[in-house]
Amino acid sequence: MVDFTGKNVLVLGGSRGIGAALVRRFAQGGARLAFTYAGSKDAAEALAAETGAEAVRSDSADRDALIRTVAGRGALDAIVISAGTVVLGDPLTLDPDAVDRMIDVNVRAPYHAAVEAARRMNDNGRIIVIGSVNGDRMPFAGAAAYALTKSAMQGMVRGLARDFGARGITVNSIQPGPTDSDMNPADGPMAETMHGFMAIKRHARASEIAELAAFLAGPHGAMITGSMQTIDGGFGA
Ligand code: NDP
């Protein structure tokens, strides 16, 4: 198991789902750890009590507050940006404000958080965003705006890897396929359709995504940068 003893780690969007698995994984590794959440106070407090991580209420849609939150953690060794939302439906009738809020959380926030983290980050630090295989492949209707946000992350990762590489800082996207969470339950109405696109026909466990993040964040990830690490059971194959 990759060890993070003494490492200063921040997870954005850690109260539930993949983010909570990330918090558990970095806590197991001994990191000095904080995570943000927006609405799920009870879940955040329970996870903080379970792991010893610090829970910080900070809505990623509020850019200035988010930047203050990231800056307040000082010199990070790793930031993992998992906070994200999904808005699905016919683009002709979707609420444009809901679409823009998703873009704020899924695109603007990761960019500003990553840049702010890099400003103070220790050399050889790690910036990891949770993208999606939908950045590469969007095989059903009603998800154009969500796919847009995850494709945007790809350009961000490639560019920031160039900006911060001289300091040994790596910037990567993890691109999960269907992963069991409140956002996409393994027994949800879309599960069978999703499994139809996959070589391994099941949802991933959030802990499987967290383990990949731990690898990228650890010493063996030093030469992996500007990359999309897809973990999707073959959804995009
Ligand atoms: P969940 O909906 O289960 O959890 C979302 C988490 O993000 C919660 O902790 C939530 O906190 C936090 N969050 C959401 N909005 C904000 C915000 N504005 N500010 C701060 N925190 C916020 O989602 P998942 O765990 O499934 O998804 C995590 C990431 O993984 C997302 O970026 C998603 O797009 C991506 N992903 C998920 C896949 C899946 O199949 N599950 C597949 C591919 C990618 P709170 O409850 O406190 O608001």
Image: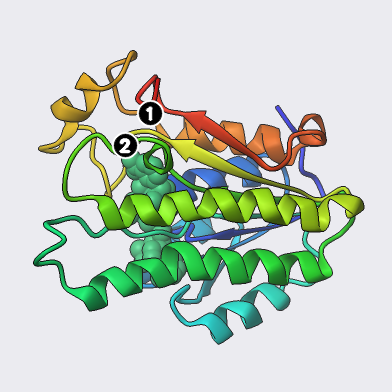
Q: Which residue is mark 1?
A: 204
Q: Secondary structure at mark 1?
A: loop
What residue is at 87 percent from the left and 59 percent from the top? 122
Q: Can the viewer see residue 160 in this picture?
A: yes
Q: Is mark 2 within 8 Å of ligand 1?
A: yes
What residue is at 29 percent from the left and 58 percent from the top? 145
- Quarter of the view holding residue 185: top left
Residue extending farthest top:
199
Q: Amino acid at mark 1?
A: Ala
- Quarter of the view holding residue 67: bottom right
What residue is at 32 percent from the left and 73 percent from the top? 100
Colour mode?
rainbow
Which callout, 2 or 1, points at the residue further toward the start of the chain?
Answer: 2
What residue is at 14 percent from the left and 36 percent from the top? 190
Between 204 and 56, the residue placed more toward the observer is 204
Q: Is mark 1 within 8 Å of ligand 1?
A: yes
Q: x, y (%) of residue 170?
A: 76, 46
Mark 2–mark 1 CB contact (< 8 Å): yes
Q: Amino acid at mark 2?
A: Asp
Taking 134 as reference, is 162 left or right? right
Q: x, y (%) of residue 104?
A: 42, 72
Q: Across the whole image, how many numbered discs are drawn on residues? A: 2
Q: Residues within 10 Å of mark 2 (few under 14, many from 20)?
A: many
Q: Above or below — where is 77 with respect to 64?
A: above
Kindly report the distance in space between the C-alpha atoms of the residues bearing marks 2 and 1.
6 Å
